[in-house]
Image: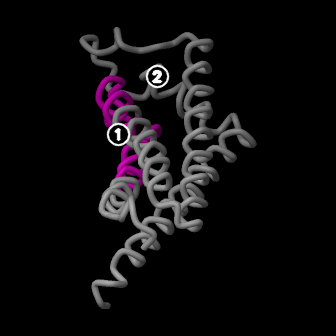
Amino acid sequence: MSTSHAPRALSLAAALLTGTVALYIALVALGNITDFGTNQAFVQHVLAMDTTFKDDDLMWRAITSRGLQNTAYVAIIVWETVAALVLVAGTALWFRRDNGRARRLSTYGLLMLVLLFGAGFIAIGGEWFSMWQSKTWNGLDAATRVLVLTGIALVVVQLSPSDQEG
């Protein structure tokens, strides 16, 4: 590939990766909306810490209020939905070759997912609520996979041209 094609190829890679992550998170949000109870149970168990080692030094962190658990779950679904919409818009802009706006929107959407899966699921769920201790309600592997895919997409988006038609 010659260097004159590199900006176009990088923009195409950014578009396809952004679109892939958009599709994934849109399907996750749709699944959480249409099959509300499945992941609602996941969030409830993680926050309640009821399948962890139940160490007295950690159990004070548990949130057992159904209202707070459900509020957290609905907030996750709203966050996923907004991220999906931002990423779909970013994908459309890549294909319109509006690289500056595409890069900006894609970055925002991808960073939303870094916060959700990195800070939310891995750091807060995994460590604060000791999700790693649960054999039944442990989403760390899935969260890590999404964080890696999102991180790769974010790097490619940042490497892509933002101010040229390429």
The residue indicated by pointer 2 is 47
Q: Position of residue 31 (x, y in %)?
A: 67, 47
Work out whether residue 155 or residue 94 is closer to the camera in this orientation and state it: 94
The residue indicated by pointer 1 is 118
- Magenta stretch holds residue 138: yes
Q: Position of residue 19 (x, y in %)?
A: 55, 62
Work out whether residue 148 or residue 22 is closer to the camera in this orientation and state it: 22
Range shown magenta: 121-148
Q: Position of residue 147 (x, y in %)?
A: 37, 50
Tell me how many marks there are. 2
Q: Amino acid at mark 2?
A: Leu
154 shown above or below 30: below
Seen as rendered, the residue at the extreme bottom is 1
The span from disc 2 to disc 1 (Cα, nearest Å) is 17 Å
What secondary structure characterizes most of the magenta part?
A: helix
Pointer 2 or 1: first along the chain: 2
